[in-house]
Image (cartoon, rainbow, N blue to C red):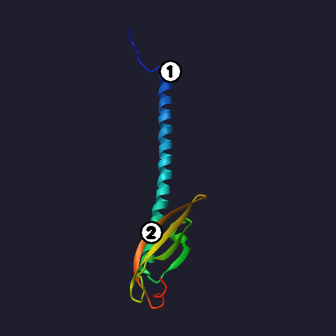
Amino acid sequence: MTGKRGFTLLEMIVATTVMGIAVVGLLSGIAGATRNAARLREYERVVQLARMQMDFLLADRTVSGSRSGRFEPQQTGGLEAGWQSRISASQTPPNPAAGQPVLDRIELEIWWMQGEQRRTFTLDAFRTRFLSGSDAGTP
């Protein structure tokens, strides 16, 4: 007797079910990875904008007090984002006089909209500046 071997209908159904479960799992993983990649791309863009704004605040020693602003849509790729900074004297000499160094603390908060949710992070930095005649009496 010649034995013909092949798959039974039940074996085909089981193999198809296992393959379907595997494909659904893979597609779910790919969708999650795509969402994470988009979120990381937004975050990286905002980090670059934060570095740019912090560099500006560190370089311009005439900027002081609190300020805020929004980033241009061309810079953010259409993402709604902005910043708020606060610059305050961190260390001043005991008897401030013109020409003496002062250590300023810069706090920069960056915000952006991710869907309906507002995301933020804060950067801190320090810079030195020299007192001018106008601000030597008030640290």
Of all residues, the one furthest to the bottom in this rendering is: 133
Relative to 136, does residue 86 appear above or below in the rendering?
Answer: above
Residue drawn at x 47%, y 46% as measured from the top left: 30
Along the line of sight, the residue nearer the viewer: 29 or 95: 95
Q: Which mark is residue 65?
A: none
Quadrant into which the N terminus falls: top left
Picture coordinates of residue 19, whole percent (x, y): 47, 32
- Residue type at mark 2? Asp
Residue drawn at x 49%, y 60% as measured from the top left: 42
Picture coordinates of residue 97, whole percent (x, y): 42, 88
Picture coordinates of residue 104, whole percent (x, y): 44, 77
Please say if the residues under marks 2 and 1 sit with CB atoms less than 8 Å apart. no
Q: Is residue 130 left or right of residue 81?
A: left
- Residue type at mark 1? Leu
Of all residues, the one furthest to the front in this rendering is: 94
Q: Is residue 116 left or right of residue 83?
A: right
Residue drawn at x 42%, y 74% as measured from the top left: 55
* Snapshot quadrant of residue 124: bottom left
Q: Residues within 10 Å of mark 1 (few under 14, many from 20)?
A: few
Residue drawn at x 47%, y 35% as measured from the top left: 22
Along the line of sight, the residue nearer the viewer: 80 or 131: 131
The residue labelled by disc 1 is 10
Q: Which mark is residue 124?
A: 2
> Is disc 2 placed on a helix, strand or loop?
strand
Picture coordinates of residue 116, whole percent (x, y): 61, 58
Of all residues, the one furthest to the top in this rendering is: 1
